[in-house]
Amino acid sequence: MKLLLTLSFVLALCSSFTTRVGIEDVISAMKAGNSALVAKHFDSNVELSMPDKSNSYSKSQAELVLKDFFANNPVKGFEVIHKGENAGSQYCIGTLVTKSGSYRTTIFMKQKGDGQVLQELRFENR
């Protein structure tokens, strides 16, 4: 009985941890300006909004657009302002600091299967 109770507790703890891993991985990748690591978490279609363009892209297209954005705006850091979750979705609002300026950044992730996928990424001029 104790073993079953302990196993249930560990399983619940692990499943709550895996939910949070996705957003933390994306935040780390944003801090590094690493488009490939961010793209690992993209859903099959991703909504990207940038000061000069906004569109829905396939996963591979979105990675290229983000790579180009980071190439034109070399990342110096990313500061989290707020993050939270709501009904299985996670979000983060932060400031992406680049050599060419700062961008208010919003990350939206949603539970899909047994993991989190990035569905929307917004960069707005500050």
Image: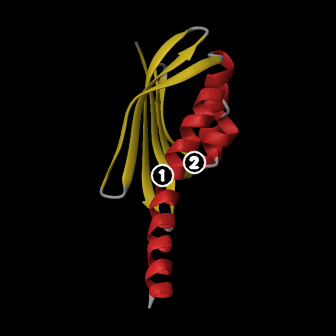
> In the rendered image, which quarter is residue 49 located in?
top left
Residue 81: x and y, percent? Answer: 39, 26
From the viewer's perspective, is residue 5 above or below residue 85? below
Tell which of 30 and 122 is nearer to you.
Answer: 30
Image location (x, y in percent) of residue 69? 61, 24
Query: Disc 1 or disc 2, which is closer to the eye?
Result: 1
The amino acid on which the numbered mark 2 sits, given as a three-letter code, is Ser
Residue holding disc 2: 58
Residue 44 in view, yes or no:
no
Residue type marked 1: Arg
Circle 1 SS class = helix
Q: Nearer the viewer, residue 52 or 118?
A: 118
Q: Residue at x 46, y 18 (%)?
A: 103
Tag 1 residue: 20
Quadrant of the rendering where the N terminus is positioned? bottom left
How far across and down, in percent of the image, does residue 95 sit?
A: 46, 21
Asked if residue 20 is positioned above or below residue 37 in the image, the reply reads below
**Label tally:** 2
Looking at marks 1 and 2 on the same chain, the residue that comes earlier in the sequence is marked by 1
Badge 2 local density, few (<14 within 10 Å), some, or many (20+)?
A: some
Q: Which quarter of the figure is the C terminus placed in?
A: top left
Q: Is residue 64 visible?
A: yes
In the displayed structure, 44 sits above or below 123; it is: below
